[in-house]
Amino acid sequence: MSDLDELHRIAERFVALTDLMLDAAQAGQWEAFFSAHDAREAQMSILMDAAGDRLLIDLPELRPAFEAALQKSLQIDDLARARRDDLGDNLASLQTQRRLRSAYR
């Protein structure tokens, strides 16, 4: 297998992991999301080390897949931001409950 074939395989795995991340985030399966995120970061590190900015120059056929992955990443950002906000609201509510409980003991 050539180096470009290996890069192509890794890039396809990166894109597939982006799909998994989006699916997990949409389903609220955050442990699966983080597992896919960690695996995707490892793939990105390999791609950057091996090809850096030349990846899409060397493998232009990947451009549509990477553009789609970018759009999915934007959706993931929105879902993660909404989850973070929900967790913040829950934490504030929990802190209020604790203060009330301690004030009325």
Image (cartoon, grey):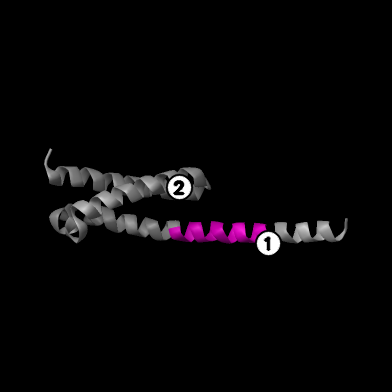
Q: Secondary structure at mark 2?
A: helix
Question: Which residue does the image show at 32% across and 47% down from the upper left?
Answer: 42
- Percent from the top left, x then y, of residue 51? 18, 54
Residue type, mark 1 in image: Ala
Which contiguous range is marked in magenta?
A: 77-91
Quarter location, residue 63: bottom left
Question: Which residue does the image show at 46% across and 47% down from the upper left?
Answer: 33
Give the farthest residue toward the top. Answer: 1
Name the residue that disc number 2 marks.
34
Tally of numbered tags: 2
- Percent from the top left, x then y, of residue 28? 53, 48
Marks 2 and 1, Cα distance to the nearest angstrom? 24 Å
Name the residue that disc number 1 marks.
92
Q: Quadrant of the image for the N terminus?
A: top left
- Asked if labels 1 and 2 touch by Cβ distance under 8 angstroms, the answer is no
Give the farthest residue toward the right. Answer: 105
Relative to 53, is 39 on the left or the right?
right
**Above or below 81: residue 6:** above
| Number of residues whose C-alpha sits closer than 10 Å to that of mark 2, classed few (under 14), some (14–19) or many (20 or more) | some
Q: Secondary structure at mark 1?
A: helix
**Above or below 11: residue 98:** below
Nearest the eye: 49 or 31: 49
Relative to 31, is 53 on the left or the right?
left
| Number of residues whose C-alpha sits closer than 10 Å to that of mark 1, classed few (under 14), some (14–19) or many (20 or more) | few
Residue type, mark 2 in image: Phe
Q: Quadrant of the image for the C terminus?
A: bottom right
